[in-house]
Amino acid sequence: MSQAEQVDGAFKDLSSELRNFTEIARGIVPLPGEVPSLACVDVYGQILPLNGVAGGDHLIYVDFKKRYDLDARIAAATDAGRPDIVANLDRCRRKAGVALIDVAGHHGTDAMLAAMFHQAFLTGALYELDISGSITRRLFENLNQRFNRTSSVNKFITMLYGEISEDRTFRFLSAAHPPPAIFSAAHDRFMEIVPDSFTSFPPLGVFPSQHVVDQRAVTHDVLGFKDRYAVNEWTLMGAGDILLLHTDGVLEHARGDERYVSDRLERAIRGAKHCSAQDIVHTIIDDLKAFADPTDDVSLVVIKTC
């Protein structure tokens, strides 16, 4: 076999591996049927990978009613004499979760860490429902510990996991993720976020968790330990209010020295505020691309009250 034939064969093997990886990455993209369905709450999200296929951004919907058999779980918890779990599972009927992560980098292979998070998160969620009937901070302490022990510090992951309830309460935990933005229908603008109302933590895996059962297995860490995660709680006050979750592909989007956030983004939302969550997301993405070509993966989730 000539050297040219060897190079051609190696290239074909590599191309085949990348196609296979791409198909795997596509398999964890949320399907339309997974979008949460709640009374008086409209949810829609979209990821725009920079390479058009798969990158470091990832979105997971957790509509508890769709993803789990709550009736069977409640019956099992009742038989086990666990009224606390029964109560938590019953509350799951009226809320849904959204996990949005951003792996440093926007190459197709960065989707590998996103896929690792995807499987670990959903597996952990099953155990959380078994133990508590709800997803608790314990899951994220364990995820942080796992990624700290297995991932390189320079490939960090920012994360936001939040749960929106039918009473318009949004409870969320942030690991160095851009803060959510609230567009008020009554005031026709973004509302100022009071610093005390938003607590964030280092990227997932950068620091080991101090408050986990196996903490003693980590004898030392030159960078120290992460404090226990805290949960933020916001309430969307009026009908038509819009909660926007996004990655830094939106936050850092610019045309020269002009930033897309927040004046241009605010105008785009203002013009589409009467539309559905899906149409608002499509409007923002179209406007963002018209403003300037993206230089990173772009992800948006709109949660709109009615």
Image (cartoon, rainbow, N blue to C red):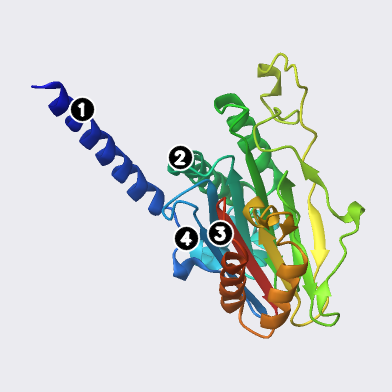
Specify the quadrant that holds the N terminus.
top left
The location of residue 284, given as percent across then percent down, is 62, 70
Of labels 3 and 4, earlier in sequence is 4
Residue under the image location 55 percent in, 56 percent down: 59
Q: Which mark is residue 293?
A: 3
According to the picture, the residue beneath numbered tag 4 turns out to be 30
Q: Which mark is residue 237?
A: none
The location of residue 223, given as percent across then percent down, is 76, 21
Query: What's under tag 4, amino acid-wise?
Result: Pro
Of labels 2 and 1, earlier in sequence is 1
Of labels 1 and 4, earlier in sequence is 1
Say whether residue 137 is left or right of residue 113.
right
Q: Secondary structure at mark 2?
A: helix
* Vertical comparison of 188 with 91: above or below: below
Q: Secondary structure at mark 1?
A: helix
The location of residue 108, given as percent across then percent down, is 44, 44
Alpha carbon separation for disc pair 1 and 4: 37 Å
According to the picture, the residue beneath numbered tag 2 turns out to be 112
Q: Is residue 135 visible?
A: no
Alpha carbon separation for disc pair 2 and 1: 26 Å
Alpha carbon separation for disc pair 2 and 3: 25 Å
According to the picture, the residue beneath numbered tag 1 turns out to be 7
* Vertical comparison of 126 with 259: above or below: above
Query: What's under tag 1, amino acid-wise?
Result: Val
Q: Nearer the viewer, mark 1 or mark 4?
A: 1
Residue found farthest to the bottom: 274
Q: Nearer the viewer, mark 2 or mark 3?
A: 3
Of labels 2 and 3, earlier in sequence is 2
The location of residue 182, given as percent across then percent down, is 78, 68
Q: Quadrant of residue 6?
A: top left
Alpha carbon separation for disc pair 3 and 4: 25 Å
